[in-house]
Image (cartoon, rainbow, N blue to C red):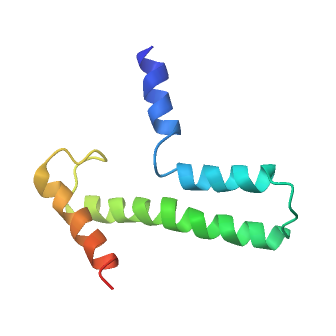
Amino acid sequence: MKFLIKSASYIFHPLWMPFAGSLFYFLVTPRFFPLPLIQAKLLAIAITTLFIPVVFYFLLKNLGKAESVFLKDVNQRRWPLFFLQLTYRS
């Protein structure tokens, strides 16, 4: 049971949901979308929701600001919030 719950938390993680939802939308909708448009949209969604957070985590880990993905200490959580605030300030 614990394995099932843990695997579900990784599968339905908020980082994956925008990409999975968009992929599901493009596969299910009866409208015609050109394949290059679908690929461009999915690539843009993957970059913003998957690649940027992973690269940012590895940057924090290499700088010694994060020990694990879970950021258990309050001091470790400050850096992602600081950069998130700088990103959405403009």
The quadrant of the rendering that contains the C terminus is bottom left
Tell me if residue 65 can be seen: no
Q: Is residue 88 left or right of residue 51?
A: left
Q: Is residue 45 left or right of residue 61?
A: right
Residue at position x 62%, y 49% in the image:
20
Foreground pick, 70 / 88:
88
Tell me if residue 45 can be seen: yes
Q: Is residue 11 left or right of residue 25?
A: left
Residue at position x 12%, y 52% in the image:
74
The quadrant of the rendering that contains the N terminus is top left
Q: Is residue 80 left or right of residue 32?
A: left
| Rendering coords of residue 16 (x, y %) | 53, 49
Q: State which quadrant residue 29 falls in.
A: bottom right
Residue at position x 23%, y 48% in the image:
71
Foreground pick, 54 / 22:
22
From the viewer's perspective, is residue 37 above or below residue 49? below
From the viewer's perspective, is residue 71 above or below residue 54? above
Residue at position x 19%, y 56% in the image:
77
Foreground pick, 79 / 12:
12
Foreground pick, 44 / 63:
44
